[in-house]
Amino acid sequence: MTWYDKDYKKRQIVGVDVFGGGGSSATIDIEIEIPKDWDTFWTEIRSDMLDVVVTNPLGELLSFARKAGANYSTRTLVLQVDGYASNHDNSMNALFVYYGNASETTDHTVSVTISSAKNGYIL
């Protein structure tokens, strides 16, 4: 596993159950709901959430967006990943949520279209 960027101080593994994902070459959409009670996350991120990114296990940035309604003050955040190339059918896959880069000024999100999303779970 490669670290995405040295300026991102923290990362958290996310498990994605791809059971029935459609085969080893299939792509899937994923939604990751960030728990409101994950204090470590909420106290380390910027209020504009620019320092929250999603990567694959190799530290490569994925096509992701913050779902409409993301709100720092109410601790509401759902990350949507578009077209993830699942490496296994009928198993768990791992992604990473990186956060904690106080100097990040770039918004790494993109416009995504999510269909039949699999759930990602903070582990």
Image (cartoon, rainbow, N blue to C red):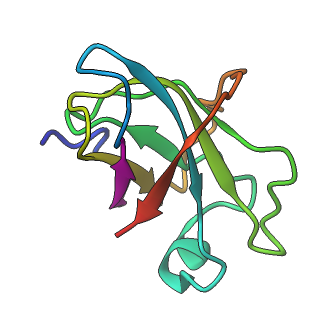
Q: Quadrant of residue 50?
A: top right
- Extreme residue in the right direction: 69
Which residue: 28% across, 13% down? 25
In the image, residue 53 lies at what x, y percent? 50, 43
Which residue: 34% across, 56% down? 15
Which quadrant is home to the C terminus?
Answer: bottom left
Which residue: 55% across, 49% down? 52
In the image, residue 80 lies at what x, y percent? 62, 39
Left or right of 79? Residue 120 is: left
Which residue: 38% across, 50% down? 16
| Of residues 108 and 65, the one drawn nearer to the viewer in this rendering | 65
Q: Quadrant of residue 39?
A: bottom right
Left or right of 65? Residue 22 is: left
In the image, residue 109 lies at what x, y percent? 64, 30
| Image vertical order of residue 71 relative to residue 63, above or below | below
Answer whether residue 7 is visible to the viewer in this image.
Answer: no
Name the dominant secondary structure of the magenta segment.
Answer: strand
| Image vertical order of residue 36 relative to residue 66, above or below | below
What segment carries the magenta color? 9-18
